[in-house]
Image (spheres, rainbow, N blue to C red):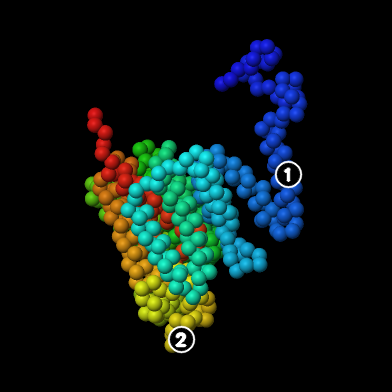
């Protein structure tokens, strides 16, 4: 710490102020500069809000402040974006057919801009070597090639750019900085806390309105458009908390983690999203499998006990009949939603038949659907522009067999590296985190069979940083332990 000069008459440890006789009156402090800047931004924000809208005006104030936070600490700014992720809303840009997730995407733009500027001024880290990163680049190349031959080139370009900035923010930054000062654990804590808050929010909604089909679908609104997105986000939060609980050294932290995971599990079940039932079963199965292989029998009993308590809670809400009914309808071909999925999948199949190698173009399924739909299967939604309800069929229709095979290879690679990260973990904590990450990734793969969430920030970002953390733990498991 610097000291004031004795001949200046300043007390030791006191910073001279402008206008005090120690500094020229025209030399404002950084606090004064900041206050003037904020005041100027407020004036501009008021003018913009009156001309365009209050959200844009608010962004004029908050985004520069966020840019300053990015400059001070990129990891803190990244976690801030994650913290506001559940509150994002899809806003259509006036005068265009495009939409932005606000505030998530504007914050990502600012973050990436500051990150690039810092890299130019201070130098960038070398890109880590990762087989998963290499496979993602292969997928990106296939998407670009499919866009070149697409009937809707502009739509493909927009979809590639959107996927690109989500991947750079959600995957590349955690991959490069995830090993710093507990960044990985802090990310899972923020995600788990957000998931717990919205689980309680949804359970309170069910307690107030009762358990019915519409309440399950609406329990996350207005923050989540429907129960599918809600259940996927909550499942990522659940498995992240599960990994933290398994890795906790203190018993109280482990108990609190399991309780929070149980609350989120209850919320996912009450959402009545049928794919979520299968996803929860996959997450539980992967967790128990790895715990049994690691010889952690007592922990297995704890996980089973949490599952039993969740079952009693479902009975307490008198939701057992609804859950059983919706679970049974998964294999019922006469169910309207199942029939609609079949028609959408058949359209994707027809796209692949017409364009077997590279499909109709990345990000163009919705607009291409009307040329490939099956009219003999009459459903309520057959004339509606909507998604394919499956990430795998979306990949097949938009990127052809080449794209689907690359997606399957990518998934197999993540499972392979995740399994190695569990088996060869450098520490019990790393093994526990890897188990939680693999449970989350497995649940998302099951969700992806029945739904497509490629455009939702609330699903895409957790998917990317779960994948990045699997790659990090795999890389750490391959490091040679230092000699004593």
The percent position of residue 52, horizontal first and vertical second, equals 71, 59
Above or below: residue 28 compared with residue 152: above
Q: Residue at x 69, y 14 (%)?
A: 8
Residue appearing at x 34%, y 64% in the figure: 406
On the question of residue 317 being in view, the answer is no
Q: In this view, does 19 lie above or below 416?
A: above
Q: Callout 2 environment at 10 Å: few (<14), some (14 to 19), or many (20+)?
A: few
Instruction: Please tell me which of labels 2 and 1 falls first in the chain.
Output: 1
Question: Which numbered marker is on residue 40?
Answer: 1
> Which quarter of the image is occupied by the C terminus?
top left
Q: Give whichever of 310, 404 is nearer the camera.
A: 404
Name the residue furthest bottom: 376
Q: Nearer the viewer, mark 2 or mark 1?
A: 1
The answer to which of 125 and 259 lies nearer the viewer is: 125
Q: Horizontal placement of 395 versus 425: left or right?
A: right
From the image, tell me which residue sits under label 2: 375
* Mark count: 2
Secondary structure of the residue carrying tag 2 is loop
- The x and y percentages for residue 7 are 68, 11
Give residue 139's quadrant in the image: bottom left
State whether residue 245 appears in this view. Answer: yes
Which residue lies at the image location 52% right of the left edge and 69% below the top edge?
Answer: 155
- Classify mark 1: helix, strand or loop: helix
410 to the left or right of 94: left
Q: In which quarter of the image is residue 343?
A: bottom left
Asked if residue 351 is positioned above or below residue 416 in the image, the reply reads: below
Image check: 286 left or right of 337? left
| Residue 83 horizontal/vertical position (percent) | 52, 49
């Amino acid at each position: 710490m610097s000291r004031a000069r004795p001949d200046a008459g300043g007390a030791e440890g006191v910073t001279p102020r402008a206008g005090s006789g120690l500094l020229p009156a025209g030399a404002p402090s950084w606090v004064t500069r900041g206050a003037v800047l904020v005041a100027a931004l407020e004036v501009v924000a008021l003018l913009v809000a009156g001309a365009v809208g209050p959200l844009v005006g608010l962004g004029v104030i908050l985004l520069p402040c966020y840019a300053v936070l990015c400059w001070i600490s990129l990891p803190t700014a990244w976690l801030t974006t994650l913290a506001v992720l559940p509150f994002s809303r899809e806003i259509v840009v006036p005068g265009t057919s495009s939409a932005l997730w606000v505030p998530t995407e504007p914050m990502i733009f600012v973050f990436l801009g500051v990150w690039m500027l810092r890299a130019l001024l201070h130098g960038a880290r070398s890109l880590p070597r990762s087989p998963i990163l290499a496979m993602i680049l292969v997928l990106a190349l296939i998407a670009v090639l499919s866009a070149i031959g697409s009937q809707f080139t502009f739509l493909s370009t927009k979809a590639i750019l959107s996927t690109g900035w989500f991947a750079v923010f959600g995957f590349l930054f955690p991959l490069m900085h995830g090993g710093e000062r507990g960044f990985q654990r802090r990310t899972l804590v923020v995600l788990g806390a957000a998931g717990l808050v919205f689980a309680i929010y949804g359970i309170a909604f069910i307690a107030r309105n009762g358990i019915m089909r519409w309440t399950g679908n609406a329990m996350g609104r207005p923050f989540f458009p429907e129960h599918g997105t809600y259940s996927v986000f909550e499942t990522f939060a659940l498995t992240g908390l599960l990994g933290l609980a398994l890795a906790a050294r203190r018993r109280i932290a482990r108990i609190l983690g399991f309780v929070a995971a149980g609350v989120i599990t209850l919320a996912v079940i009450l959402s009545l999203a049928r794919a979520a039932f299968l996803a929860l079963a996959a997450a539980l199965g992967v967790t128990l499998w790895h715990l049994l292989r690691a010889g952690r029998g007592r922990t297995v009993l704890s996980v089973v006990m949490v599952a039993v308590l969740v079952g009693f809670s479902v009975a307490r809400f008198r939701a057992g009949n609804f859950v059983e009914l919706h679970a049974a309808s998964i294999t019922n071909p006469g169910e309207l939603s199942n029939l609609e999925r079949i028609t959408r999948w058949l359209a994707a199949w027809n796209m692949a038949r017409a364009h077997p190698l590279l499909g109709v173009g990345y990000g163009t399924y919705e607009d291409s659907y009307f040329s490939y739909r099956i009219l003999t299967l009459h459903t309520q939604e057959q004339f509606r522009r909507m998604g394919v309800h499956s990430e795998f069929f979306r990949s097949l229709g938009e990127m052809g067999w080449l794209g689907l095979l690359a997606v399957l290879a990518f998934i197999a690679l993540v499972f392979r590296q995740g399994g190695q990260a569990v088996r060869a973990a450098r520490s019990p904590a790393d093994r526990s985190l890897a188990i939680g990450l693999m449970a989350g990734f497995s649940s998302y793969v099951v969700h992806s069979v029945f739904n497509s969430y490629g455009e939702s920030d609330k699903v895409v970002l957790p998917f990317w940083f779960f994948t990045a953390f699997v790659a990090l733990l795999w890389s750490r498991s391959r490091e040679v332990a230092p000699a004593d």
